């Protein structure tokens, strides 16, 4: 039953649910109530991979390239820790959606006073704009590297993704997921070939996954580490996952919801482990090529593209880099558009046709992104990409702590309330993120 048909009040919430999240595709994918469990589990495969896209977007490339070229394999542990954090937080998103029937934006609107909800909406929009800047730049650079299209025209072309989503969703949400998974497969193949060509020091790679205090004590390394964290655990992904999980028609009984939560968590965990492989591959490639050759300040995507051929000795290497980057950019703009719609609808509860809502939410994000990208041009893209990821990291707490609050509340979650150990772990993650962000701000203020 759509959430708009539910009772006017619900225990634990200040106001009733409004329209269902992504109402045009809400509960549109059937889930069989009988048959083998693997077939029921297969119905939930998809949302996790849309979320995983955010863990390998163009902003991630810039921070990982910068980290790998400057510090070798040292920051691999940050990618691993970030991925563990992501698995926990995305699991909580699925739990919130399935237990309450709300995405994170709707939950904030229904739980907090209007001024608080408005501030959280504003911060979420800033996060999505920062996300879009990274994705617009990445897609435009990818188009430039492969087809020679100028950056300014490439930025405009990225806006057309909204029509791609409208077309695919008309065919069914599974088509959106199929596009994303296919492009992820292309990215994985491109990186597998590049890593094989780079022939990294696997002993150093393994050591890179071990923690070191230098990451916290070195301000420059901390800045890049926070950029990787911001590029990995992204605020818009928390809103996105809690919305797209509800595209499954999993039923309303407690056993059905428990099974849906189990399969949705498996889907996101497997997808995020795949994302870690790709994410780590970017850093390993930078460490094995640029750092090894003494090129310690590579962060520009275009510069990395030019350097790969002479360092790896094959002309195909930069082509693979460009193809993977373009696929990442397309994937990321598609998922950011969906996240923008979920945030706008959820916080403001606007009642407009789906196609118009998607156009409006896309414009809010892409107009400032396009202006900033064109203003900076080719020269400043790397600094801008890394800055967007740090901005995302600073925004994280404003999405993470409400998520933890909601999933820990028995009145709001009912029998699917998160266990205490999980909440304690998630709270520790939230505190670590907040403390690291405070240290970053202090370093900026003191010139550290």
Image: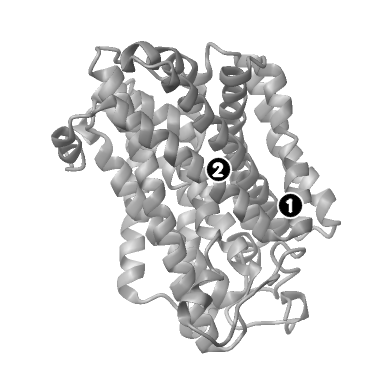
Q: Residues within 10 Å of mark 1 (few under 14, many from 20)?
A: some
| Residue 404 shows up from this direction | no
The quarter of the picture where residue 253 lies is bottom right
| Residue 82 shows up from this direction | yes
Residue at the image point whose x is 40% and y is 60% from the top:
269
Give the position of the N terminus as an image quadrant. Answer: bottom right
Residue located beneath label 1 in the image: 168
Give the position of the C terminus as an image quadrant. Answer: top left
Residue at the image point whose x is 69% and y is 17% from the top:
152
Q: Element type at marker 1?
A: helix
Q: Whole-percent x and y of residue 374?
A: 66, 17
- Image side of residue 180 versus residue 209, left or right: right
Residue 151: which disc? none
The quarter of the picture where residue 215 lies is top left
For marks 1 and 2 on the same chain, the one whose residue lies earlier in the sequence: 1
Between the residue at mark 1 and the residue at mark 2, the CA separation in whole angstroms equals 15 Å
- Image side of residue 432 versus residue 401, left or right: left
Q: Whole-percent x and y of residue 434?
A: 37, 47
Residue located beneath label 2 in the image: 183
Q: How many marks?
A: 2
The colour style of the image is: one colour
Q: Are marks 1 and 2 in contact (CB under 8 Å)?
A: no
């Amino acid at each position: 039953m759509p959430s708009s048909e539910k009772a006017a009040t619900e225990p634990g919430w200040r106001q009733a649910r409004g329209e269902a999240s992504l109402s045009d595709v809400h509960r549109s994918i059937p889930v069989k109530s009988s048959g083998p469990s693997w077939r029921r589990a297969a119905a939930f495969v998809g949302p996790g991979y849309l979320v995983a896209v955010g863990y390998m977007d163009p902003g991630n490339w810039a921070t990982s390239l910068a980290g790998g070229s400057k510090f070798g394999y040292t920051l691999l542990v940050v990618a691993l820790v970030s991925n563990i954090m992501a698995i926990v937080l995305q699991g909580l998103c699925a739990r919130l959606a399935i237990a309450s029937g709300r995405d994170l934006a709707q939950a904030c609107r229904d739980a907090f006073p209007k001024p608080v909800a408005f501030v959280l909406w504003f911060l979420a929009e800033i996060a999505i704009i920062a996300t879009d800047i990274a994705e617009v730049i990445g897609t435009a650079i990818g188009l430039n590297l492969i087809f020679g299209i100028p950056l300014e025209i490439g930025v405009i072309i990225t806006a057309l993704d909204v029509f791609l989503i409208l077309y695919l969703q008309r065919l069914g949400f599974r088509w959106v997921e199929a596009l994303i998974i296919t492009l992820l497969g292309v990215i994985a193949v491109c990186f597998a070939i590049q890593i094989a060509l780079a022939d990294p020091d696997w002993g150093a790679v393994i050591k890179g996954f071990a923690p070191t205090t230098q990451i916290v004590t070195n301000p420059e390394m901390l800045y890049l580490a926070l950029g990787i964290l911001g590029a990995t655990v992204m605020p818009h992904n928390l809103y996105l996952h809690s919305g797209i999980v509800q595209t499954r028609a999993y039923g309303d009984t407690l056993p059905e919801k428990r099974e849906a939560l189990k399969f949705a968590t498996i889907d996101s965990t497997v997808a995020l482990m795949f994302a870690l492989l790709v994410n780590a591959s970017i850093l390993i490639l930078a460490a094995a090529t640029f750092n090894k050759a003494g090129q310690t300040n590579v962060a520009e995507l275009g510069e990395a593209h030019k350097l790969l051929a002479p360092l790896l000795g094959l002309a195909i290497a930069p082509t693979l880099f460009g193809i993977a980057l373009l696929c990442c950019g397309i994937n990321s703009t598609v998922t950011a558009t969906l996240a923008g719609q979920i945030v706008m609808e959820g916080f403001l509860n606007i009642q407009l046709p789906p196609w118009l809502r998607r156009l409006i939410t896309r414009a809010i994000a892409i107009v400032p992104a396009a202006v900033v990208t064109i203003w900076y041009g080719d020269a400043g893209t790397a600094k801008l990409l890394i800055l967007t990821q740090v901005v995302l990291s600073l925004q994280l707490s404003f999405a993470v702590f409400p998520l933890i609050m909601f999933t820990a509340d028995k009145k709001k979650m009912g029998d699917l309330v998160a266990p205490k150990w999980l909440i304690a772990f998630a709270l520790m993650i939230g505190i670590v993120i907040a403390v690291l962000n405070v240290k970053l701000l202090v370093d900026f203020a003191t010139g550290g």
